[in-house]
Image (cartoon, rainbow, N blue to C red):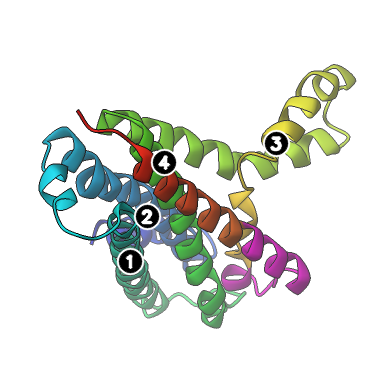
Amino acid sequence: MLTAATAWLAAEFSGRQPETVGLDVGLSLIRLFGALLVLFWVTELLGKDLERRTIYFVLAYPFPRSIYILSRFLAIAGLAAMAVIGLGLFTLAAWWLVAHSGYEQSNQVYLHGLALTLPLIWLDMLAIGAFTILISALSTTPMLAFFVGLAFTVSARSLGPILAYLASDQATTKQVKIYQPLLDAIHWIIPDLSRLDVRSATLYGIWPDTATTLWSSAHVALYTMIALALAMLFFQRREFN
């Protein structure tokens, strides 16, 4: 409801293009709340088991520890899918109210673009969840995984715009010299989640390049699987005192 109300209010206070503004704010909130929800779920489903020592009851069952990690990831993936669908419906409800308010904007929105925008937001959430699970498998406190996962989210979503800025004419030679080597190294460690933000397809009908979108999606999906595999490996070898 908060997503729908905020999107509707943003559209109502917009001087022009209220439908576009409402959808833009709604999609931004889905990405924001989606990431926070994933971090919260990992903390509750995995971190709190370790903190409260209830993990010992789970490990007593005759199945590999990797199944425990996989089950937690699948649960988070399912919750993330329901969250994206639910928040997407609330955003559409806000758009419907704005569209039937009596003001007809000059440029239409392209709601069929949500068929691409929302699944990529879900993939973005899966990558955040897999990385945070990996940190949880290594850490002893749930809040450490939460804050490291939050830092990962901000870094991965900001990486693309920063690299684009350094490649533009606005960046100074000193900035490029200092930050470009560091960011090139970081690019091998974290994925560029900003490439999964394709809201322009919904807002303006500007669809991203198909090859770039497929490559970016495959890269993030591969990163998610690697992070999950490492979490299983580290958790399998972890010693509990």
Q: Are marks 4 and 1 in contact (CB under 8 Å)?
A: no
Distance between the alpha carbons at the discs numbered 3 and 1:
28 Å
From mark 4 to mark 3, how far is it between C-alphas? 32 Å
Q: Residues within 10 Å of mark 4 (few under 14, many from 20)?
A: some
Task: Say what amino acid the circle numbered 4 marks.
Answer: Phe
Q: Is residue 83 above or below residue 190?
A: below
Residue at image location 40% in from the left, 72% down from the top: 95
Which amino acid, mark 1? Leu
- Pointer 3 residue: 162
Crowd band around label 2 with a 10 angstrom C-alpha radius: few (<14), some (14–19), many (20+): many
Residue 35 seen by the camera: yes
> What residue appears at the point 30 percent right and 52 percent down from the top-left corner?
65
Q: Earlier in the sequence, mark 4 or mark 3?
A: 3
83 left or right, relative to 14: left
Q: CA distance from mark 1 to mark 2?
A: 9 Å
Is 162 left, or right, of 84 in this rendering? right
Up-down relation of residue 19 to residue 216 (above or below): below
Q: Is residue 218 magenta?
A: yes
What residue type is disc 3 on? Answer: Ile
Residue 5, percent across and down?
A: 28, 60
The range drawn in magenta is 201-219
* Residue at mark 4 to residue at mark 2: CA–CA distance: 26 Å
Disc number placed over residue 87 in the picture, else none: 1
Mark 2 sits on what residue?
34
Q: Quadrant of the N terminus?
A: bottom left
